[in-house]
Image (cartoon, rainbow, N blue to C red):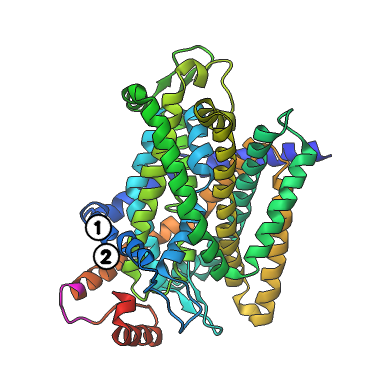
Amino acid sequence: MWESIVNVVTKVNAFINNIVWGWPMIVLILGTGILLTIRTKFMQVHKFGYSLKTTIVPTVKAIGRGKDKQKDTKVNSISQFEAFSAAVSGTIGTGNIIGVTSAILTGGPGAVFWMWLSAFFGMITNYAENVLGLFFRKKEKNGDLSGGPMYYISEGLKWNWLGYIAALFCVLAAIGMSGAQTNKISTTLQAAFVSDGSSKVVAIIIGVVVALFVALIIIGGIKRIGKVASILVPFMSLLFIILALILIFIHIDRIGHAFGMIFSSIFSFKAAVGGFGGFVFSQIIKKGLARGVFSNEAGLGSSVIAHSASATREPVKQGLWGIFEVFLDTFVVCTLTALVILTSYNEEQLFGAQAVSDTAAAMNAFSNVFGTFGTVVFSIILPLFAFTTILAWSYYGEKCVEFLFRRAGQKGKKVAVLVFKVIYVLLIVASAVIDGELAWAISDTCNGLMAIPNLVALVLLSGLVVKITKNYFDRKNGKDVEPMLSAYPELNEEFKKDIQNNNELMN
């Protein structure tokens, strides 16, 4: 019975996935990024230094002084860094390690180039999402700040029906993303500590433990998620970066060959051994773009849901965090993963008849150099990456459920959110035992569905993004213009007064 259900789900998902991740999606993702890049005059390039100067640099300095100038007690918000951490916890997950490894194994080294390309344009796509998200976010009766693609679609385009579709797809994507992350926690821990490598009983136990920890944290909402993420994300990211750099340095003589493999197989890939076969151009870029979007989420409109809870009143300021977010996720973490894999193995080991799975390939790269220590550390890093992603997506799903039931009254929304959280936690247990490839495939499909309405909105509202951006930098340059802080006049006035009364908070 269970196998029959899985077979049906697999076939249905494969059919939808082939449609969703066809050429129209590839053109839409890249086309949106190219359009926004041109309209903002390559802002991700000429304002990259400014984005670092106004985001991560002052945050690190503030932490060093034991201060956080971005707190706001007037609304139920979180600091800019906590919002960034919550968003990054959703983007930096198993996709950065296992997803990149999988893309290389199934799409060839050239898939890495397409990750980079999608990330370059994704930086400005994510920026635009954040700008629109904060501009159209709502202030709830309880003081919560709610935003996301469903809001700028329904309020900006005045297409309520598409806003509801976007919210529904986000709920599905949240469940799909949670499933893929939980599955990799299970397979990683089993590969490291279970002698036979696979046990459904152990998988269920792992799923239950993960579900319990998730339940305890998501009860506290975005504030608790932001707190946990702001602690775990810097720690695990730094630890992974240090170990990856050590691995790459050990194999420094192979770096040139690794880059050669990437650039020589951008458009086609023929393995040096017969066991892998050839990959056509469309398959390579599909793997690269799908895994790139899975990793940095630019184009999905998901991370903006967390960014919208930020204390900042300036949409552009939070948008700049989006530029850094994609840069950190793909150009730093994903690139390090790719170099670790491509310098640790030769073509026969990666693409030959005896090629190992994505999880085993990534874990062995660490254990082969660091021994038991590498296995243990990898078995800590990957589950932490996955765990924080599960937390972030629980919040994304929760806010979308609130949007779907916003006309049901406060009590109706609470009941709907409670039901979602219960289902979300229960599915974590189920995800621990399903086939890993199916978990990834379902997540890819759900991500693609979520991206469609968001990308359409970004294209149609691109002119507004340019206008808000120009307004911000005009004011920074001393021009006396009316601030564009919110789409709603009363909230715009409130935010203006906040900036005037607490200039340190916003600048």
Give residue 21's position: percent from left, percent from top: 50, 41
Q: Residue at x 41, y 25 (%)?
A: 343
- Magenta stretch, main secondary structure class: loop
Q: Secondary structure at mark 1?
A: helix
Q: For the residue carrying disc 1, how many other residues have a C-alpha within 10 Å: few (<14), some (14-19), or many (20+)?
A: some
Residue 30 seen in the current view: yes
Mark 2–mark 1 CB contact (< 8 Å)? yes
Q: Categorize mark 2 by other alpha carbons within 10 Å: few (<14), some (14-19), many (20+).
A: some
The CA span between labels 2 and 1 is 7 Å
Q: Residue at x 55, y 62 (%)?
A: 228
Q: Measured along the vertical axis of the image, is residue 313 above or below residue 121?
A: below
Percent of width and height locating residue 403: 57, 71
- Is 2 or 19 nearer to us in this picture? 2
Residue 466 - label: 2
Determine the secondary structure under disc 2. Answer: helix
- Which region is colored magenta? 476-481
Tell me the quadrant of the picture where the C terminus can be found.
Answer: bottom left
Report which residue position mark 1 lands on. Answer: 39
Residue at the (48%, 65%) spot, across then down: 306
- Left or right, residue 291 beside residue 221: left
From the image, which quarter does the N terminus lie in? top right
Picture layout, residue 125 above or below residue 205: below
* Image coordinates for residue 88, horizontal then vertical, percent: 46, 55
